[in-house]
Amino acid sequence: MMYTQLWRCPKMMKIKDPTFFEGIRDFLGSYLPKIKNSSPHTVSSYRTTLSLFVAYLQNSL
């Protein structure tokens, strides 16, 4: 399984308040590349790291 697939994990879709994931999506899609002018590699790295963190939280709780 690729790490980027964790970001779209079905378990995450069960969250009733999607505000967290909307904020992350905006951060990765708008803030980093457009405002901070981050490279695509940086955005990909952040996405992978956040996906792993969410997977860790799901397994720990």
Image: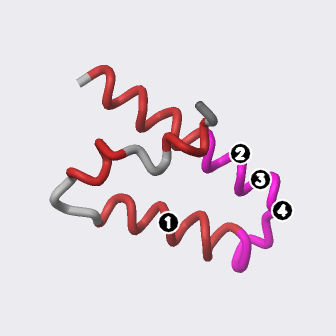
Q: Earlier in the sequence, mark 1 or mark 2?
A: 1
The 10 Å Cα crowd at callout 1, few under 14, some 14 to 19, many 20 or more, is few
Q: CA distance from mark 2 to mark 3?
A: 5 Å
What's drawn in magenta, residue-wise? 33-48
Looking at the image, the residue that sits furthest to the top is 60
Instruction: Identify the residue shown where x is 79% and y is 64%.
Output: 38
Q: CA distance from mark 1 to mark 2?
A: 14 Å
Q: Earlier in the sequence, mark 3 or mark 1?
A: 1
- On the image, numbered disc 4 is attached to which residue? 39
The quadrant the C terminus occupies is top left
Provide residue 5's location: percent of width, then percent of height.
Answer: 55, 44
Instruction: Identify the residue shown where x is 29% and y is 54%.
Output: 13
Q: Are marks 3 and 4 in contact (CB under 8 Å)?
A: yes
Instruction: Identify the residue shown where x is 67% and y is 67%.
Output: 32
What is the magenta segment's predominant secondary structure? helix
Instruction: Reply above or below: 21 against 22.
Output: above
Q: Are marks 2 and 3 in contact (CB under 8 Å)?
A: yes
Judge by depth and name the residue closer to the eye, 43 or 14: 14
Q: Mark 3: which amino acid? A: Thr
- The numbered mark at residue 25 is 1
- The numbered mark at residue 45 is 2
Total number of numbered labels? 4
Q: CA distance from mark 3 to mark 1?
A: 14 Å
Q: CA distance from mark 1 to mark 4?
A: 16 Å
- The numbered mark at residue 42 is 3
Judge by depth and name the residue closer to the eye, 1 or 6: 1
Report whether 19 appears left or right of 2. Answer: left
Q: Mark 4: which amino acid? A: Ser
Q: Are marks 1 and 4 in contact (CB under 8 Å)?
A: no
Is 20 in the magenta?
A: no
Is 38 in the magenta?
A: yes
**Which secondary structure, mark 1?**
helix
